[in-house]
Amino acid sequence: KFKKNLYQSYAEFTAKSSSKIISLLRDRIPNSTSAINAILKLISSIILALSIIIALVLINYKITFLILLCLLLYYFLISRKVKNILTRNSKNIANLEIDNIRIIQESSGGFRDIIINNNQKLYQHIFKEIQVPLNLKKANSEFLIAFPRFIMEAFTIIVIASFGFYLSRTSND
């Protein structure tokens, strides 16, 4: 989209407001849907987790509390490690977002000069130099947010399977 905006005619450019261009370039709608999606996932995860915990408590509350203690300990340790990296990433992302908006505003504000001086490739290069690290930091943060959950889910499945195996062995004896 950024490249398309740089190579449009001046008449096309003046017909659009710069705030509309910036808003579209910043992908406002996907951010909103991501937030709603995250809330819905959180609600469904809470319901599922509570259902599993209640079922396990009804089967054997001692082992269930031991499993919950292990999971909480794991979560605490992982969250301490990931928190520092996410904090650093968020600061980098915030700075890159500012640079990203600045280059969009500069290209929008000086659009006529960009066309006259034929600087589209320069601005496109600057935008790309900001966008690539920004996307990498965002992807890294998304991975760090999701990774502990996947490990925790795998650990939980292993523990529940072991718990079931243990109960089946002890009930036969």
Image (cartoon, rainbow, N blue to C red):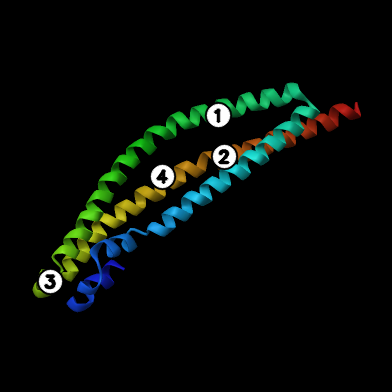
State how far apart marks 3 and 1 are (Cα).
57 Å
* Residues at discs 3 and 2 in contact (Cβ within 8 Å): no
- Precedes in sequence: disc 4 or disc 3: 3
Question: Nearest the camera: 83 or 155?
Answer: 83
Q: Secondary structure at mark 1?
A: helix
Residue count near mark 4 (Cα–Cα under 10 Å), binned few <14, some 14–19, many ≥20: many
Mark 3 or mark 2: whose residue is earlier in sequence: 3
Q: Is residue 146 left or right of residue 83?
A: right
Give percent across and percent down for residue 36: 51, 50
The amino acid marked with disc number 1 is Tyr
Does residue 53 appear in this view? yes
168 or 91: nearer the viewer? 91
Q: Residue at x 9, y 72 (%)?
A: 117
Quadrant of the frame with the C terminus: top right
* Mark 3 vs mark 2: in front: 3
What secondary structure is marked by label 3?
helix
Q: Residues within 10 Å of mark 2 (few under 14, many from 20)?
A: few
Q: Secondary structure at mark 2?
A: helix
Classify residue 159 by image quadrant. top right
Give the alpha-carbon distance from disc 4 to disc 3, as whole Å: 37 Å
Q: Position of residue 19 (x, y in %)?
A: 26, 61
Q: What residue sits right under mark 1 in the picture?
A: 74
The image position of residue 13, as x and y in percent, is 21, 73
Residue receiving disc 2: 151
> Tag 1 or tag 3, which sits nearer the N-term?
1
Decide which of tag 2 and tag 4 comes sooner along the chain.
4
- Left or right, 73 with respect to 163, comes to left
Number of labels in the image equals: 4
Q: Please determine whether, in this image, residue 152 is positioned above or below residue 105.
A: above
Image spot of residue 129 (x, y percent): 24, 57
